[in-house]
Amino acid sequence: MNGKAFLYGVLLQFKLDIRSKTMLVTCYLVPLVFFFFMSGIFLSVDPAAAETLIPSMSVFVVTMSALIGLPPSLAEVYGGEVKKVYRANGVPLALGVVTQFLSSFLHTFLSCLVVFFAAPLVFEAALPADLPLYFCSLAALLCVTLAAGCALGLAIRSTAKLTMAAMIIFLPSVMLSGIMFPATMLPPFLQYAAYAFPAAIGFQAMTDFAVWHLPVLFAVFIVLCVAVALLLRAKGRN
């Protein structure tokens, strides 16, 4: 497959996702309603939350879009007739994962940009102190979480089981990451358990700007990519 055909596939998937009700709800509607509704509550309870409002709401957008929105779409592709069409036309099975990944990345990043520009205007939220590192951390977290969503969508065929598994990962990712309340309020063992979820590392990367966060996220991304490749190989044998 040449580069022009690949770009056309990504653009086509991007347009299809614009019309997708799942993408609309999980990437735009619910996260942005949560942002506009909950931000006022957070600031009324703790005015200091304005310092971390943009990173915290971006983590919520990323986590919901990647873990709740992406896996069902991917499961439909590899659990239905699309996989047969790929095989019949000699299209690599990896194309579906790559185009879904890139399309979801673009849609989710656009939603995060809405948060980035709206938060200072509507809620007087503070901009991140280091913008280049902030956006690098956001991109890294987005890649890792989307890779986890891809792995879920490939590993679980049943829609009901997939939804349950996604929620099992989504809820602790949000609750333990520090975006709802300071992580220091958690018991020590839960503070350590939070690092099992990329959301906690990503949130710290976007607020503390420590050097070690990005390499850790990159390493997790590589592991997840290997897992996705193995799952694709298994799909190809079925």
Image (spheres, helix red, strand yellow):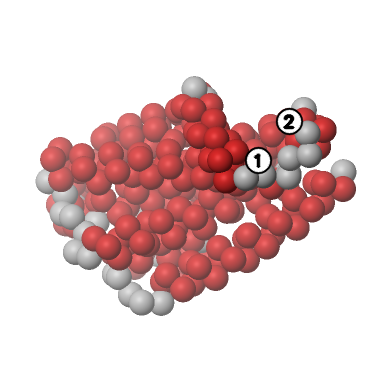
Circle 1 Cα neighbour tier, 10 Å, few/some/many (<14 / 14–19 / ≥20):
some
Residue picked out by circle 2: 82
Residue 153 in the figure: left or right of residue 233: left
- In the foreground, 27 or 188: 27
Q: Say above or below: 182 vs 109.
A: below
Residue 226 at x, y percent in the picture: 68, 62
Asked whether residue 159 appears in the rendered view, the answer is no
- Say if residue 14 shows up in the picture: yes
For badge 1, the amino acid type reads Gly
Looking at this view, name the residue that lies furthest to the right: 238
Residue 90, by quadrant, is: top right
Residue 234: image location, x then y, percent: 82, 51
Amino acid at dot 2: Val
Q: Taking 87 as reference, is 30 left or right?
A: left
Q: On screen, 225 above or below 86?
A: below
Q: Residue 76 occupies which quadrant of the picture?
A: top right
Question: Residue shown at 35%/66% (left/top)?
Answer: 205
The residue at 75%/50% (across/down) is 232
Whole-percent x, y for residue 223 in the image: 62, 66
Which of 55/195 is in front? 55
User: Pointers 1 and 2 in contact (CB under 8 A)?
Assistant: yes
Task: Return the disc, 1 or 2, that comes first in the chain's sequence.
Answer: 2
Judging depth in this view, the residue of 51 and 189 nearest the camera is 51
Q: Which residue position is annotated with label 1?
A: 96
Quarter of the rendering containing residue 24: top left
SS label for mark 2: helix
Name the quadrant of the N terminus. Answer: top right
Please, what secondary structure does the residue beneath circle 1 have? helix
Q: Position of residue 87 (x, y in %)?
A: 81, 37
